[in-house]
Image: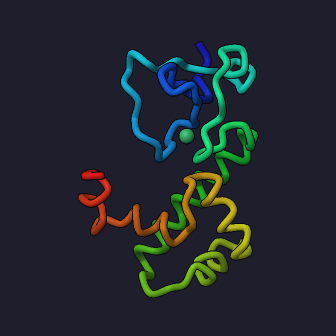
Amino acid sequence: MPTPQFYGVTTTGIYCRFGCPSRTPRPENVVYLNSTQDAQVLGLRPCKRCRPDQLTAPHQAFHEFVASQLVILAQQHPAHTIKEHAAALSISTRQLEWIILLQTGFSPRAYLNSSMPASLSERIST
Ligand SMILES: [Zn+2]
């Protein structure tokens, strides 16, 4: 069996990328999908946060990489602006904002706030 690309949630009728910030579904409601076509066949809609319909796999891998790099940069240089982080990643600020939005559904700043250890307990309780 190939590694699935997405998961669908039968109770909500949406499908997501793995790593979507949406609530983790109950296992009995999950269907594994190999493509967006699989999701369409099942009548599932793409999630608005992780946009599984909008990117191809190579982009996704790059975006995941950028997102993880951004978290490391922010931990190393907490005082840096998003613009400075983008420069460190060799991409434009707009590109970084777009990538993080597509990847996580948040602005880079909101994403970093939610990724930082200090706000971890806050995130879990919501
Ligand atoms: Zn999602």
Q: How is the image coloured?
A: rainbow
Tally of marks = 0
Q: Please identify the quarter of the rendering in which residue 108 is found.
A: bottom right
Residue 125, horizontal then vertical, whole percent: 25, 52
Q: Quadrant of residue 46?
A: top right
Q: Horizontally, is 111 left or right of 1 in the view?
A: left
The location of residue 76, given as percent across then percent down, is: 42, 77
Q: Residue at x 57, y 54 (%)?
A: 105
Q: Between residues 88 and 42, which one lies in front from this camera angle?
A: 42
Residue at the (49%, 42%) spot, across then down: 19
Q: Residue at x 59, y 23 (%)?
A: 4
Q: Is residue 52 left or right of residue 108?
A: right
Q: Nearer the viewer, residue 28 or 3?
A: 28
Task: Judge whether 37 appears above or below 105 on screen.
Answer: above
Quadrant of picture, ligand 1: top right
What residue appears at the point 59 percent right and 55 percent down from the top-left corner?
65
Tell me: residue 30, above or below residue 99: above
Q: Nearer the viewer, residue 110 or 1?
A: 110
Q: Is residue 41 above or below residue 24?
A: above
Q: In the image as oriented, which residue stretches furthest toward the bottom?
A: 79
Which quadrant of the rendered structure holds the N terminus?
top right
Coordinates of residue 20 in the picture (x, y in percent): 51, 43
Give the percent coordinates (x, y) of residue 23: 41, 40
